[in-house]
Image (tube, coloured by chain):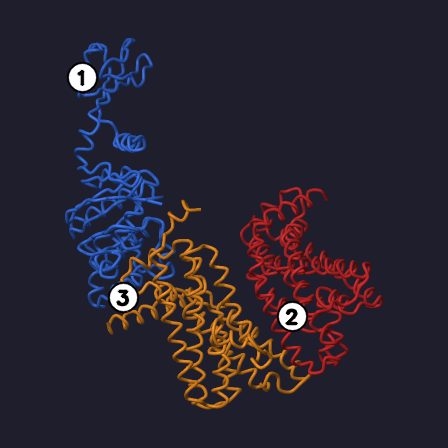
Chain colours: A orange, B red, C blue
Amino acid sequence: MLTAVRNQIRISLLTTKYALVREMLNKATFFMNIVFMILNDASFIIQWVILYSIQDGIGGYNLKQVLLLWGLAAGTFGFSRFFFYRAFNLSEIINNGKLDSYLVQPKNVLLSVITSDVSTSALGDIFYAYIMAFIYKCSITNILLFTFFIITGGLILVSISVILSSLSFWFQKADMIAETGVSLMTSFATYPDGIFKGAVKILFYTLLPVGFVNYIPVGILSEFRLEYLILVFVVALFFIVLAFVVFYRGLHRYSSSNLMISKI
Amino acid sequence: MRKYLYIYKSEIMSNLQYVSNILFGFIGYFILLFVFFNLWKYLYSDPNELIHGYSMEQTIWYVIVTEILWGTVGGRKLCQKISNDVKGGNIAYNMNKPYDYVGYSLFNHLGIATIKGIIYIILGFLLGILFLRMVPSHTIITILLVLLSSIMATIISCFLIITIGLFSFLIEDSNPLYWVYSKLILILGTLFPIEFFPKIVQPILTYSPIYAVAYGPAKLFVNFSWDVCLQVFITQMIYITIGYILCKFIYNRGVKKLNVNGG
Amino acid sequence: MKAVRNIDFSVEKGEMVAFIGPNGAGKSTTIKMMTGILYPTKGSINVLGFDPTKNRRKLAYEIGTVFGQKEQLWTHLTPYDNFKFFGAIYDIPDYAVEKKIEELKELFELGDFINIPVRNLSLGQRIRCEIVASLIHEPKILFLDEPTIGLDPVVKENIRSLIKRMNKEYKTTVFLTSHDVGDIEKLCSRVIIINNGQVVLDDSMENLKYHYLNKKIVEAKMREKVNLEDEDGITILKDKGYNLKIEVDTEKRTVADALKLLNPDNIIDINISNVPLEDIISSIYRKGDKS
């Protein structure tokens, strides 16, 4: 069991490495993608500087905390898109019957598929995330905690995308749902939760778990609370397990490629 | 002109089936407005307060209109199509056709834009009314002028994006250029009116395309005045001319290069 | 929707079996079920003692697949690096992979291009690499789906002889699907034909070729015009006066009968042959459609 897990991780990292090597074949484009993504993320600082010139403290966040929130959003986004890029077009892979080559390999299908490609620009997001983390508070514990939250948050994002994309096993149009669901997470992730009132806040801790990906972590980075840390970990675990369950349920209905055509 | 109308019509027909996709895309628009509504409600602690001369309703309607304009254009697709045409050699194929490539691309894209525009306008208004329970006051004449300037804004956007796409003739990848353009419009043009920016940058923004493609129509909608209207239309006329000349210029240079290289 | 029903056959170790059928007959579905890609809605499958639906991973160690147009190789890496990658997928220790690559390199004659990125290789070279990649883990069964599609005749011939050599060397069972009769004829000793989701024929290549149709084709060039008409057991396929093509049903008439009808003194040139395999196969396909 343990060797199987180790071998699986080895293969996933090897795949990521090879995919990265492929991206780096064109060095200029590679670096440009990263630099532009950093600039992209940084451009939103303008928005916040202007908003904070109207009023100090928005939704219970000061400017530095908003930048940290942005850093965390970029970090979770980048981590998930770099290591698990294919989780975000899993619907297309399912609909077009591209799982075949993974199914004949003696490895975990879901992990093999979602780690089979990387997004270069996601590296820019990760860099930007750490720049923001350093600006916020330059300490080892802070950076370690930040890294922990990027991983848990990133995995929650990946799991949500896998869960929604797996609906494609049941009906084809699920790709829209997956895309929309994932982008909703990002839309909320970059605004302080204090500006929202009422029922929406419940959503943040249930259907759209931005709370566990972004808001609680920013809270912990401002003021450490062990119980919240454990909570984030448990929630991440829950989503990961759910993702595997839903995907493998759906896999029984997988219809490969040429059958698809006859179905349409 | 009839052939352009035909291109335009067939593009509308073939895109009607994608309405469901557009509706899904609209969820993103809804959420964005929802976030902005909450954000501005939070920032306008007193409902009668004015920030940089705008009431809360005006600020939010401004975002609704600029986002309608941005969503209608859907520039990324247009830019990709143009640069694919350039790189994939499609443009050489189109060269022998009895129509102007720039005109073809413009009307082709306006077909998609029309459908999107209509849906965005309807839904944008419903959302505005849902969130704000008011619409800025207008007469039929003034609302038609806003609509006209919005159409002009869309055409200018298309010209500018086609120009960027055509840059693929000269540089390997025009994506970064499009990216810079879209960032400028999004950050400086759609989130809040030019008046919210520091005094020193305001004149620059006023003369930039942002005024013609985003600020102008939105400003006219939230607070119509004949002075501004005149100014907006003059600016838009100038930008339409500039945009078209730029497209043709880059296209002609590119085609020459193509001929030299033998396609 | 039912793609296949009650398909049952067993294959000997080291056998090369052609698994063929018209488009939509259910052969892809069958192969995909056998390799663990598709779940059957009902019933059970047993491959090498494994149920693919329950022991997909265990089965994966024992089978190799080359799915024609679908490439499994990383195109920016060299074949060598690709093979090492596949070695890792099948959890083979480094030294063992290297030994295996060396061996397969000789067998499939990859020496010239094993260190050139796959994207710079010709289609034929790529297919050879695809096959090698699927053999790294020494599978007991190799599934080949249209292995020679899109290749020119010379390269096709080359690939076929390499597959033959591999089968001789390793005793790997080969399960081949192809629309190319050449692949089937040159490689396989046994043919399973499937149509409408059922096995319609399971026989040796020999029987299929010589006994299935019991027909011979006689082509003759004559000195003088002969006037022939169809009779029991003899069908005129082509009659251009001096050039004749006759089909003889050997169950009803002998070839000698047919020759007697043509005045032997008048024959300038004659050729007696079997019905082409392609025609035999399509006649079986057509039969299946009628039922």
For numbered disc 1, what is the local secondary structure?
Answer: loop
Q: Which residue is mark 2?
A: B184
Indicate the chain on which mark 1 is placed. Answer: C
- Of labels 1 and 3, earlier in sequence is 3
Which residue position holds label 3? C88
Q: Residue beneath label 1, please?
A: C253
Give residue C133's position: percent from left, percent from top.
27, 57
Q: Nearer the viewer, residue C70 or B225?
A: B225
**In the figure, A55 relative to C156: above or below?**
below
Camera-side residue of C73 and B116: B116
Q: Chain of mark 2?
A: B
Evaluate whether residue B256 shows in this view.
no
- Structural crowding at the residue carrying mark 3, measured as other residues with C-alpha within 10 Å and reported as few (<14), some (14–19) or many (≥20): some
Which image quadrant for residue A79?
A: bottom left
Compute the Cα span from label 1 to label 3.
62 Å
At horizontal 55% and vertical 62% (from top left) the residue drawn is: B173
Q: Position of residue B181 (x, y in %)?
A: 63, 67
Q: Quadrant of the N terminus of chain A?
A: bottom left
Q: How many numbered discs, if any?
A: 3
